[in-house]
Image (cartoon, helix red, strand yellow):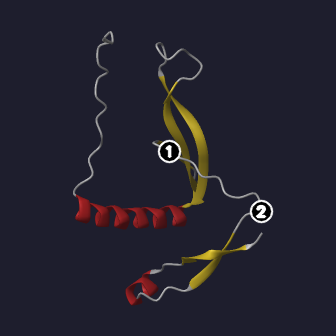
Amino acid sequence: MGESRFTCRISTPANRAQENYPQVALLKQVKGICEVYANVIHINWTAYDVRLRLGQLIADPRTSPQNAKWVVEEQAAITMAYGEAKYLRNLLHGIILDYEAKNGELKMPVLPAPPAPVEPK
């Protein structure tokens, strides 16, 4: 593992108020990291932790495009302790509030109905 030139900041209520974040080096994994895109999240939990299964909604590749149904292709799963889940919730809440203050309220997208097939001219 090599040390990255990037750093992350550990944020706690005390140092957020002072805007005094300690710098922590970010170590790169030997195998690299797995980056995924997800537009579907399934959640389950136990008494000890929370698990997020991330997926991507795609046309079923096992069928022809004309007959394909929507399926969710699993991309990754993340399991974390409740404390981390709460911290993630707080981070996301703050990021979304800031985004909406600058760009307007986020609304859930509505998928339009598919158009009727039209023969090209």
Residue receiving disc 1: 38
Q: Residue at x 49, y 78 (%)?
A: 11
Image location of residue 86, percent across then percent down: 46, 64
Is residue 47 at least partly visible in the picture?
no
> Given the image, on which type of amino acid does mark 1 rest?
Ala
Q: Residue at x 53, y 62 (%)?
A: 82
Image location of residue 117, percent across then percent down: 32, 12
Image location of residue 22, percent across then percent down: 55, 86
Q: For mark 1, does the 10 Å Cα neighbourhood hold few (<14), some (14 to 19), or many (20 or more) residues?
A: some
Q: Is residue 73 above or below residue 49?
A: above
State the SS at label 1: loop
Q: Residue at x 31, y 31 (%)?
A: 111
For the image shown, how many numbered marks are present on the structure?
A: 2
Query: Is 108 situated left or right of 42 in this image?
Result: left
Q: CA distance from mark 2 to mark 1?
A: 24 Å
Residue receiving disc 2: 30
Is residue 93 at least partly visible in the picture?
yes
State the SS at label 2: loop
Q: Is residue 63 above or below residue 94?
A: above
Q: Is residue 92 above or below residue 4?
A: above
Q: For mark 2, does the 10 Å Cα neighbourhood hold few (<14), some (14 to 19), or many (20 or more) residues?
A: few
The foreground one among 50 and 60 is 60
> Given the image, on which type of amino acid does mark 2 rest?
Val
Q: Residue at x 24, y 59 (%)?
A: 103
The quarter of the picture where residue 100 lies is: bottom left
Q: Looking at the figure, which quarter contains the N terminus? A: bottom right
State which mark lies toward you, 2 or 1: 2
Image location of residue 88, percent across then percent down: 47, 63
Residue 29: mark in rendering? none
Q: Are marks 2 and 1 in contact (CB under 8 Å)?
A: no
Q: Looking at the figure, which quarter contains the C terminus? A: top left
The foreground one among 98 and 64 is 64
